[in-house]
Amino acid sequence: MMEQRPIGSREDLLAHAIAIEREAAARYAELGERMRDLGNDTVAELFLRLARMEKDHEQELERRAAGLALPRIEPGAYAWIDAGAPQIAAHDLALSLLTPQLALKIALAAEVRAAAFFEAARKQAADPALAELAAEMAAEEGVHIAWVKSTMRRTPSGAVDWNSVFS
């Protein structure tokens, strides 16, 4: 993730928010399919629901940004797994090694980063309307954090208790 710089305008905030939502939608879709492949329908459904919500958020933000000159955000600036352009084999390998708990931890870390980004933007905003928009976005991320944490509590770790195996 790129270093946070001051968000000085609605255009800056919207550009970053769109990039964050786009990355989240793509990663959640991948994680949802991976969890479905593993037979973990509970985690798969969470990720696929989040993918749809993030895509909806992205589209709503793009509607809000219609007609505005948004700054360019570098591809990969908000990447969850890969920095920059991924090598397909490395990306696929990383996905194939993910357990439900690890996927949830990655998702939680990404949601926490997004919430922190929007909260920092809210705190530094001189314009009350910009602060309100950033607060709205931070609150949405807070809901996602709660969902991921709830699913983490209900998802077995997948770790083998070797003491019970050899007892």
Image (cartoon, rainbow, N blue to C red):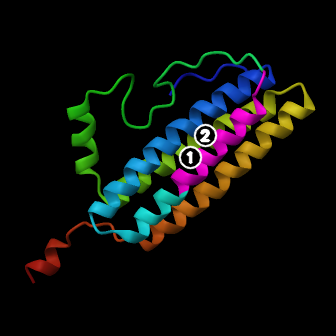
Residue 18 belongs to magenta span: no
Task: Please say if 134 is above or below 99.
Answer: above
User: What's the residue at 80%, 21% (across, down)?
Assistant: 9
Left or right of 45? Residue 16 is: right
Q: Is residue 154 left or right of residue 121?
A: left
Task: Name the outermost residue toward the bottom.
Answer: 167
Label 2 residue SS: helix
User: Secondary structure under badge 1?
Assistant: helix
Query: Residue placed at 79% from the left, 43% from the top?
Result: 135
Question: Looking at the image, which residue is at 40% across and 56% down?
Answer: 32
Is residue 89 toward the left or the right of residue 61 in the image?
left
Horizontal relation, residue 51 to residue 124: left or right: left
Q: Which residue, given by chain and number where applicable, does mark 1 sit on?
A: 111
Mark 2 sits on what residue?
A: 114
Q: Residue at x 7, y 79 (%)?
A: 166
Residue 59 falls inside the magenta stretch: yes
Circle 2 packing at 10 Å, graded few (<14), some (14-19), many (20+), is many
Is disc 1 surrounded by few (<14), some (14 to 19) or many (20+) residues within 10 Å?
many
User: In the drawing, what numbered circle is on residue 23?
Assistant: none
Residue 38 image point, x, y percent: 27, 63
Q: Please tell me whether the stretch drawn in magenta is mainly helix, strand or loop.
A: helix
Does 100 sit above or below residue 26?
Answer: below
Q: In this picture, which residue range is highlighted in magenta?
A: 50-67
Amino acid of disc 2: Ala
Q: Quadrant of residue 133?
A: top right
- Find residue 78 and report its horizontal and vertical position in percent: 51, 30
Give percent across and percent down for residue 90: 23, 33
User: Does the CB distance between marks 1 and 2 fall below 8 Å?
Assistant: yes
Amino acid marked by disc 1? Glu
Q: Residue furthest right?
A: 128
Provide residue 138's location: percent of width, then percent of height.
Answer: 71, 45
| Gap in angstroms between the C-alphas marked 1 and 2 | 5 Å
